[in-house]
Image: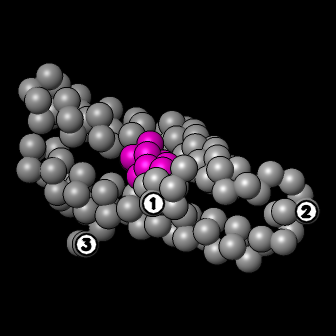
């Protein structure tokens, strides 16, 4: 696998992880936007998912998904043993921190800006609880 393909693969894992973390709000915006759910039901669904245990389960699955992506990324680069990991410790830590920060930033922008604006646009009553208020 070329270096460019490895980077693309890692970014796919980061974006997938950020998208998974936002699954508490995305379904209600999508279903209300497509007209498959009423605004009240969409708001109730997003509240149940966001304020319930589902959000923490999604966060946990996000960490698992990102960990799998990092493991595969480093395994493809030939870091397969503890000794190799010790020698490449700085690169592993830097890449892991970059992936975590990128995942959080993408999640924050996607969930709390884009999805919130889309939710308000389709009629969900999220404007009064928006983070910019």
Nearer the N terminus, badge 1 or badge 3?
1
Query: Distance between the Cα atoms at labels 1 and 3?
Result: 37 Å
The mark lying in front, picked from 1 and 3, is 1
Tally of numbered tags: 3
Nearer the N terminus, badge 2 or badge 1?
1
Q: Is residue 5 left or right of residue 82?
A: left
Q: Position of residue 103 (x, y in %)?
A: 47, 60
Label 1 residue SS: helix
Please report the bounds of the magenta region as a residue range: 9-22
Residue at x 84%, y 63% (from the top left corner): 84
| Residue farthest toward the front in the current orientation of the protein | 2
Cβ–Cβ below 8 Å for labels 3 and 2? no
Image quarter for residue 117?
Answer: bottom left
Mark 3, residues whose alpha carbon is within 10 Å: few (<14), some, or many (≥20)?
few
Label 3 residue SS: loop
Query: Distance between the Cα atoms at labels 2 and 1?
Result: 26 Å
Tell me if residue 115 is in the magenta stretch.
no
In this view, the residue in front, 5 or 69, is 5
In this view, the residue in front, 14 or 91, is 91
Q: Position of residue 118 (x, y in %)?
A: 15, 50
Q: Is residue 26 left or right of residue 84?
A: left
Q: Which residue matches tag 3?
A: 132
Q: Which residue matches tag 1?
A: 4
Q: Position of residue 22 (x, y in %)?
A: 39, 47
Residue at x 91%, y 62% (from the top left corner): 83
Query: Distance between the Cα atoms at labels 3 and 2?
Result: 47 Å
Q: Is residue 50 visible?
A: no
Which numbered dot is residue 83? 2
Label 2 residue SS: helix
Image quarter for residue 78?
Answer: bottom right
Main secondary structure type of the part rendered in magenta: helix
């Amino acid at each position: 696998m070329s270096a460019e393909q490895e980077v693309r693969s890692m970014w796919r894992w980061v974006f997938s992880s950020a998208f998974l973390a936002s699954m508490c709000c995305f379904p209600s915006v999508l279903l209300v936007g497509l007209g498959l759910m009423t605004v009240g039901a969409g708001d109730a669904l997003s509240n149940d998912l966001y304020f319930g245990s589902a959000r923490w389960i999604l966060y946990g699955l996000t960490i698992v998904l990102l960990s799998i992506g990092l493991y595969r990324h480093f395994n493809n680069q030939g870091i397969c043993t503890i000794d190799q990991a010790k020698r490449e410790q700085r690169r592993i830590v830097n890449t892991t921190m970059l992936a975590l920060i990128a995942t959080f930033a993408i999640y924050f922008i996607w969930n709390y800006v884009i999805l919130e604006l889309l939710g308000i646009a389709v009629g969900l009553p999220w404007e009064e609880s928006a983070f910019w208020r």
